[in-house]
């Protein structure tokens, strides 16, 4: 019952409530946990790296599972980590007879958190430009890893992440949550098991524009989160760094751009110094589902074709693509079309039927497809009841099993977004790629976008 009360508390907070609405199936599954009472010796001790908006979303999923306990929080924003720690301790206190709990520590440096031998795993929800280094450091420290998508900010970075995870032998789950949503898995299984016939066309609709929030950027308020009320500036004019924010560490490997509020906390996504815009933000969702359906989730693209993008002129602070389209081509002849003008979701057309799926619906081209029963032995993933994405990670970390969204797949899927952005930035309609060498082919003008320059000392390991 205390976990139901926890979810009610979660729903009462504005930002976290909105996030929970976006992932209802996952939240319901997480309340099941992995059993009732769990001995501390059998429990997964977690640290959180990145306690912003998405960090709080995935954190609450872990807190709803009795087999895990968060014991440390790291963030370069003191206000974020203090309020997040207070929420964690209040939630755990409600489960104790005394009504008190003090077992979560704060850190401003992730290396201090990773040095703790009592931390078994970390949840990483830092900005995209930090993902590679956080994952590599965590893997070298022997910690199991749940990392938000996109896995890394460039193809060389995701390669380095994959190498580090493989060398350490830790479990690494990427936050492609649609691999744990029943609607998507049914559409994927219909395609993989042949119920749609041969796939003749696969299209992916991704969000357009930049989702620049007019009421202001995400900012912590009472409870887990909310949004500030003041207007959000877009000019990028330098502002004083607020007390409690270690902005130099927030920048980390990125170029040393001057601080302004509209550059950090959520809106970093729309600047190539820190993220890749809507494409990298969503490639691990709808595109990932299409790649699974077509069995190219473990292949790197060989080309990007018909690439077009529109960049906005009135927002100099944000330089990622507003509207875009491209095709990802694979060496087995598979093509996945992507466009921000399509209805958001996955469109799969086959010789014998079609299906469309997004987070709110699954639609069948033929009524009989709705009645198809897919035997469990033919399904891609067994959901084990209602076990969600975070529960899958916790179970795999405890048991050493492979997770549903491994780093190896994320390396391949995310590459499509990075290659598309390279094509857009170099104004190319076509870009060829060598999957074996992981290098561009005959594109010297685009090569400078393949690997971003990382600021010392935060560079990739040799």
Image (cartoon, rainbow, N blue to C red):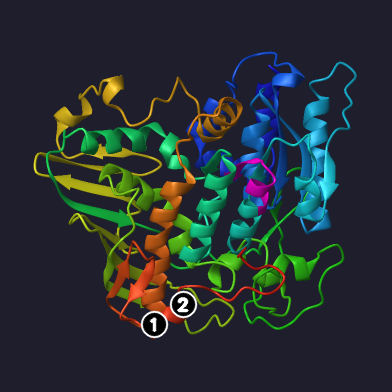
Q: Determine whether the residue tagged by mark 2 lies in a helix, strand or loop.
A: helix
Image height of 225 relative to 213, above or below = above
**Residue 387 appearing in the image:** yes
Residue 439, quarter of picture: bottom left
> For the magenta stretch, what is the residue range?
137-146
Task: Pick out the residue farthest to the left.
Answer: 351
Numbered mark located on residue 355 in the image: none
Image height of 373 relative to 389, above or below = above
Count of numbered badges drawn on the protein: 2
Residue at 83 percent of width and 37 percent of height: 104
**Alpha carbon distance from label 1 to label 2:** 8 Å
Image height of 303 relative to 257, above or below = above
Q: Are marks 1 and 2 in contact (CB under 8 Å)?
A: yes
Q: Determine whether the residue tagged by mark 1 lies in a helix, strand or loop.
A: loop
**Residue 311 appearing in the image:** no
Horizontal relation, residue 364 to residue 411: left or right: left
Residue 33: x and y in percent read 60, 22
Horizontal relation, residue 367 to residue 27: left or right: left
Task: Look at mark 1 in the image and give the residue it sits on.
Answer: 426
Task: Look at mark 2 in the image and give the residue it sits on.
Answer: 449
Tell me the quadrant of the picture where the N terminus can be found. Answer: top right
Tell me the quadrant of the picture where the C terminus can be found. Answer: bottom right
* Front residue (pair 224, 214): 224
Residue 316, quarter of picture: bottom right
In magenta stretch: residue 249? no
Residue 428, quarter of picture: bottom left
Residue 118: x and y in percent read 78, 34
Residue 172: x and y in percent read 55, 42
Q: Residues within 10 Å of mark 2 (few under 14, many from 20)?
A: some
């Amino acid at each position: 019952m205390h976990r139901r009360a926890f979810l009610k508390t979660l729903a009462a907070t504005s930002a976290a409530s909105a996030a929970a609405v976006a992932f209802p199936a996952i939240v319901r599954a997480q309340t099941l946990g992995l059993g009732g009472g769990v001995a501390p010796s059998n429990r997964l001790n977690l640290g959180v790296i990145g306690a912003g908006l998405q960090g709080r979303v995935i954190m609450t999923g872990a807190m709803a599972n009795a087999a895990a306990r968060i014991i440390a929080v790291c963030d370069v924003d003191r206000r974020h980590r203090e309020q997040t720690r207070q929420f964690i301790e209040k939630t755990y206190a409600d489960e104790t007879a005394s009504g008190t709990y003090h077992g979560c520590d704060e850190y401003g440096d992730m290396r201090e958190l990773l040095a703790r031998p009592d931390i078994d795993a970390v949840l990483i929800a830092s900005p995209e430009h930090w993902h590679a280094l956080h994952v590599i450091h965590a893997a070298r420290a022997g910690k199991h890893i749940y990392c938000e998508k996109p896995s890394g900010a460039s193809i060389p970075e995701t390669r380095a992440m994959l190498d580090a995870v493989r060398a350490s032998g830790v479990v690494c789950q990427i936050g492609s949550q649609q691999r744990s949503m029943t609607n998507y898995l049914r559409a994927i299984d219909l395609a993989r098991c042949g119920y749609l016939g041969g796939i003749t066309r696969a299209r992916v609709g991704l969000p357009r524009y930049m989702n620049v929030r007019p009421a202001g950027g995400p900012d912590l308020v009472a409870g887990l989160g909310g949004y500030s009320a003041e207007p959000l500036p877009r000019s990028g004019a330098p502002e004083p760094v607020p007390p409690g924010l270690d902005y130099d560490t927030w920048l980390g490997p990125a170029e040393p751009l001057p601080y302004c509020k509209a550059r950090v906390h959520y809106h970093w996504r729309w600047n190539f110094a820190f993220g890749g815009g809507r494409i990298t933000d969503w490639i691990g969702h709808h595109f990932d589902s299409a790649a699974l359906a077509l069995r190219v989730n473990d292949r790197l693209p060989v080309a990007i074709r018909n690439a077009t993008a529109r960049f906005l002129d009135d927002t100099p602070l944000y330089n990622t693509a507003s509207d875009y389209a491209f095709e990802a081509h694979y060496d087995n002849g598979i093509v996945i079309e992507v466009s921000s003008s399509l209805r958001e979701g996955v469109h799969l057309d086959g010789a014998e039927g079609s299906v469309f799926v997004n987070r709110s619906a699954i639609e069948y081209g033929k009524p009989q497809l709705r009645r198809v029963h897919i035997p469990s032995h033919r399904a891609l993933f067994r959901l084990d009841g209602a076990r969600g994405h975070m529960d899958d990670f916790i179970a795999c970390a405890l048991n050493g099993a492979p997770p549903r969204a491994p780093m190896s797949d994320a390396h391949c899927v995310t590459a499509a977004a990075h290659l598309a952005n390279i094509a857009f930035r170099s104004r190319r309609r076509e870009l060829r790629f060598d999957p074996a060498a992981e290098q561009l082919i005959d594109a010297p003008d685009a090569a400078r976008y393949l690997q971003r320059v990382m600021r010392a000392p935060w560079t990739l390991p040799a």
